[in-house]
Amino acid sequence: GDVTALIMTALNDYQVVIPVVDVRTWPVIIALKRDGQYMSVRNKGPLWVVYPRHAFPELKQAKHNPKWIWQLKEIVIR
């Protein structure tokens, strides 16, 4: 069937469901580096889901904040 959600899990087991419509609507990225440097676990690495708030004012709404998951360890596609 069609993919509808991305279940993201962090190293500390924090989990968030990102609707696939989000990544079809906005250029959401999984960041590996910040300012050209790989991110350590201490600095929100190794991977961090980043929404383009700077380009889409609607993403500044608080309801989107929990989706900014860092220290990402697993993605399950549903």
Image (tube, rainbow, N blue to C red):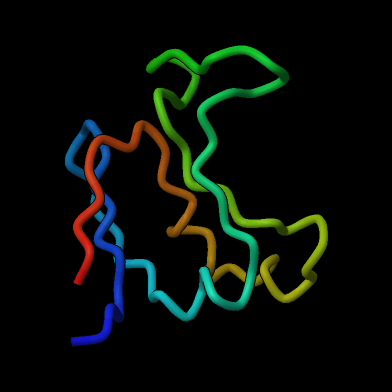
Q: Position of residue 67 (x, y in %)?
A: 44, 59
Q: Residue at x 58, y 68 (%)?
A: 62
Q: Residue at x 38, y 75 (%)?
A: 19
Classify residue 36 as left or right of residue 17.
Answer: right
Q: Residue at x 44, y 13 (%)?
A: 40
**Which quadrant is the N terminus positioned in?**
bottom left
Q: Position of residue 44 (x, y in %)?
A: 46, 26
Against 4, is 36 above or below? Answer: above
The mark tally for this picture is 0
Q: Residue at x 78, y 69 (%)?
A: 56
39 or 14: which is nearer to us? 39
**Which quadrant is the C terminus positioned in?**
bottom left
3 or 37: which is nearer to us? 3
Against 52, is 78 above or below? Answer: below
Q: Residue furthest bottom?
A: 1
Against 22, is 69 above or below? Answer: above
Determine the image quadrant of residue 28. bottom right
Classify residue 53 as left or right of residue 12.
Answer: right
Determine the image quadrant of residue 34. top right
Classify residue 28 as left or right of residue 30.
Answer: right
Q: Position of residue 42 (x, y in %)?
A: 42, 14
Classify residue 21 as left or right of residue 15.
Answer: right
